């Protein structure tokens, strides 16, 4: 049953085998044995993907409840849950991780001396299971997944430029005006050159031809600070620079709806004490309402 839930959460046999420390052949036999015992097919399998059947979906819901109850019973029998210990591996977007996750990890280590931390900062999508992380911080709307997501805040897209650039080039008053300005695209925020805005409650999409394109938020912000143009970034990345007057936000009334910030992790049944402690710390200490 635990192997079945692990496959659902990893969304692959390979990822689940890695998490469980099993060979792929052993895990496949366990799943086949479970299907034989139940007399029902739990997964649709192809060479490239695996997905739940209707029977598998029903079984997953009950299996999770059973495993969670078993886990709770074991912790109850042991008394309080074990003290957090070992290495906690977290992945987060680069700037967000530096500004908002790293300080919390420092507090975690201060509280729990038997915990060490590893923080993987990257603006690419990092697979929680395939790359062996305990928890991921995600910004934006999440794809369907068997992982658990807990919302801790939100942020939004923002267009910013330096005061000197706006003095020289003028200030756009409507998104269509951007065609007359040098724009800077941060690719994780703008995976295409179709930029979206909100106007009178409706989506307004525009295709732009940025003067600069980068996969680094720090670089996009540096270009804006150097008066190279108007950068499209995330608000939390430039909040301090706006407050200090080094950058100016433009077209704020046309900003699209905020994006959620989630902590994503395996089911509660698989959480270790160190992961629980970090999630509790986020809930206690984090102020991630960054819109």
Image (tube, rainbow, N blue to C red):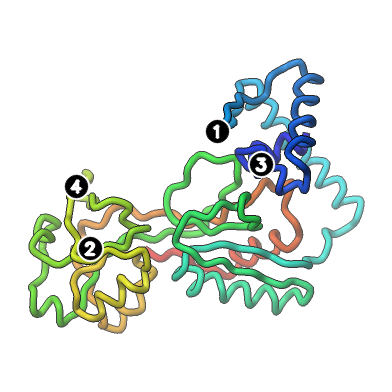
> Of label 3 and label 4, which has the lower sequence position?
3
Crowding near the residue tagged with mark 2, few <14, some 14–19, many ≥20 C-alpha atoms within 10 Å: some
Q: Name the residue under label 4.
A: 204
SS class, disc 2: helix
SS class, disc 3: helix
> Of label 1 and label 2, which has the lower sequence position?
1
| Most foreground residue, 191 or 62 | 191
SS class, disc 1: loop
Q: Where is residue 224 in the image (x, y as percent from the top left)?
A: 24, 75
In space, the residues marked 1 and 3 are separated at their CA atoms by 11 Å
| Most foreground residue, 136 or 83 | 136
In this view, the mark in front (3 or 4): 3
Q: Mark 3 points at which residue?
A: 14
In this view, the mark in front (4 or 2): 4
- Residue at the right extreme? 77
Asked where in the image residue 35 lies, by quadrant, the reply is: top right
> Of label 4 and label 1, which has the lower sequence position?
1
Q: Which residue is drawn at 8% across and 63% down?
A: 180
Q: Name the residue under label 1.
A: 48
Q: Name the residue under label 2.
A: 252
Is residue 253 found left or right of 74 in the rendered image? left
């Amino acid at each position: 049953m635990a192997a079945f839930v692990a496959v659902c959460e990893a969304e692959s046999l390979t990822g689940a085998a890695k998490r469980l420390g099993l060979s792929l052949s052993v895990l496949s036999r366990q799943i086949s044995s479970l299907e034989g015992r139940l007399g029902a097919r739990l997964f649709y399998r192809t060479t490239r993907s695996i997905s739940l059947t209707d029977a598998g979906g029903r079984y997953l819901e009950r299996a999770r409840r059973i495993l969670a109850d078993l886990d709770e019973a074991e912790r109850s029998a042991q008394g309080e849950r074990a003290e957090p210990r070992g290495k906690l591996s977290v992945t987060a977007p680069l700037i967000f991780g530096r500004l908002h996750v790293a300080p919390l990890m420092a507090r975690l280590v201060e509280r729990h001396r038997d915990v060490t931390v590893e923080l993987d900062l990257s603006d690419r999508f990092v697979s929680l299971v395939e790359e062996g992380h305990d928890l991921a911080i995600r910004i934006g709307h999440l794809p369907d997944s068997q992982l658990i997501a807990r919302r801790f805040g939100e942020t939004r897209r923002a267009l910013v430029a330096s005061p000197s650039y706006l003095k020289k080039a003028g200030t756009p008053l409507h998104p269509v005006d951007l065609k007359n300005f040098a724009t800077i695209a941060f690719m994780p925020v703008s995976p295409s050159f179709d930029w979206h805005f909100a106007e009178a409650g409706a989506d307004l999409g525009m295709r732009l031809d940025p003067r600069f394109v980068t996969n680094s938020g720090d670089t996009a912000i540096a270009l804006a600070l150097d008066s190279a143009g108007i950068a499209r970034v995330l608000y939390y990345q430039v909040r301090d620079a706006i407050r200090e007057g080094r950058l100016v936000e433009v077209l704020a009334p046309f900003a699209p709806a905020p994006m959620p910030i989630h902590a994503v992790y395996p089911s509660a049944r698989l959480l270790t004490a160190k992961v629980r402690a970090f999630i509790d710390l986020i809930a206690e200490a984090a102020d991630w309402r960054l819109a």
